[in-house]
Image (spheres, rainbow, N blue to C red):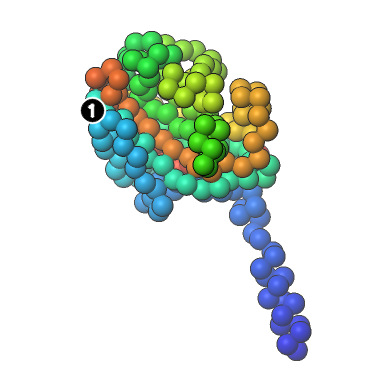
Amino acid sequence: MLKYLYQVFISILLATPLHAQNRVDIGLFSQQDITLWKQKIFSGLTQYSLEHDNNIIILSADSQQSASAFYKKIKVDLEKTPFLNWSWSKQKQINPGTESLKAGDDFVARLYVIKDGGLLFWKTLSLNYVWSFQHSKNESWDSPFAGSKSKMVSLRGISDVNGVWFNEKRNVFQDFKNLLGKTIKTIDGVAIMTDSDNSGLSSKAYYGDIYFTAD
């Protein structure tokens, strides 16, 4: 009997639900869940807060000449769940100037994934998916601050209307290969940032739930 109960117990532990295998939740803002999310200040404090938009709870980001990231340290297996899913809406567009230069590195919305280099910080890699003012969809360039270790990827632009929600889906595993020439099997964190410090302007955006899926 004890052996039977032990076998049942082990089978329960090993029987991971299908949704847990195929989805990794990063930020469930719609459920008011910002557990383990923290803020990193670079220049001034961007105000991140849970708010209602059309009866849905979202994360609001309001930047007044500021730059601080809202981030979560979490390891994600990109071989199992390579697709990053999220939604966002720009509320106040920003024209920062030349976005490929440090003076213009401001975006109304950005979401980035990080492969931590640990003590070898110079080996840290990242992909920045941004809402650009001047670049076309799927254009990419090196970060003016981190160089070739961090790629900027324009997903939305000036023609995308204020106040409208857009759903995004990116194969992060493939993006690391295509844009950085690296096979990255796991990432160590996800961050969002609405910033306007370099241009001295202000911007605002909303973010919906963020999660990884198998397909």
Q: Residue furthest front?
A: 119
Left or right: residue 85 versus residue 159 is: right
Q: Residue at x 60, y 33 (%)?
A: 172
Q: Is residue 11 above or below residue 158?
A: below
Residue 132 image position (x, y, % from top left): 42, 18
Crowding near the residue tagged with mark 1, few <14, some 14–19, many ≥20 C-alpha atoms within 10 Å = some
Residue 34 image position (x, y, % from top left): 38, 50
Could you tell me if residue 79 is visible in this image? Answer: yes
Q: Residue at x 42, y 29 (%)?
A: 110
- Which quadrant of the rendered structure holds the N terminus? bottom right
Asked whether 87 or 190 is in front, the reply is 190
Residue 167 image position (x, y, % from top left): 49, 31
- Which quadrant of the rendered structure holds the C terminus? top right
- Residue 64 occupies quadrant: top left
- Residue 182 occupies quadrant: top right
Residue type indicated by callout 1:
Gln
Asked whether 170 or 177 is in front, the reply is 177
Could you tell me if residue 213 is visible in this image? Answer: no
Residue 123 image position (x, y, % from top left): 56, 33
Asked whether 200 or 149 is in front, the reply is 149
Q: Residue at x 29, y 43 (%)?
A: 49
Task: Read off the residue under disc 1.
Answer: 64
